[in-house]
Image (spheres, helix red, strand yellow):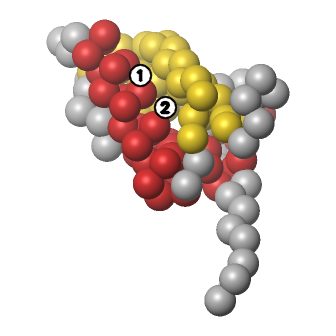
Amino acid sequence: MQGRVTVTEGALASLLALAAHEVPGVVGMAPAGLRDQVVRILGRQEASEGVVVRQDPASPGKYTADFYVVVAVGTRIPTVVESLAERVAFAAKKLAGVELSQVKVHVVGVGRG
């Protein structure tokens, strides 16, 4: 059977957010922008909260991903950031067949988890 699979940016963002939650030291995700803040105020939470995925104009077929995370108190932030970047790049490639050209991790808070 021949065909083509297309993964939307929203679906990819949800997949990557779930992968990010698996990283030790990540307590949660923070709203990435006004849209996420409004959704949170309305009492709904989406799987993709805290993740912004865009096609990379410089690298056709690849994507960039920004993560807005809260890390656990007492963790080494550089270690958590490195682990998160590796985990989501692996998940994008193995689970969605997509390559990430850039992963940016924005640590926006520290909390207990």
Mark 2 and mark 1 in contact? Answer it, CB < 8 Å. yes
| Mark 2 crowdedness (10 Å alpha carbons): few <14, some 14-19, many ≥20 | many
- Give the camera-side residue of 27 and 59: 59
Residue at x 71% of width, y 47% of height: 9
Please identify the quadrant where the N terminus is shown: bottom right
Q: CA distance from mark 2 to mark 1?
A: 6 Å
Residue 35 location (% of width, % of height)? 77, 34
Amino acid type, label 2: Met
| Mark 1 crowdedness (10 Å alpha carbons): few <14, some 14-19, many ≥20 | many
Q: Is residue 113 left or right of residue 17?
A: left
Secondary structure at badge 2 equals strand
Q: Where is 56 relative to 49, above or below? A: above
Residue 38 location (% of width, % of height)? 75, 34
Residue 71 visible to the viewer: yes
Q: Where is 1 relative to 102, above or below? A: below
Q: Which residue is mark 2?
A: 29
Q: Is residue 82 left or right of residue 56?
A: left
Q: Which residue is mark 1?
A: 70
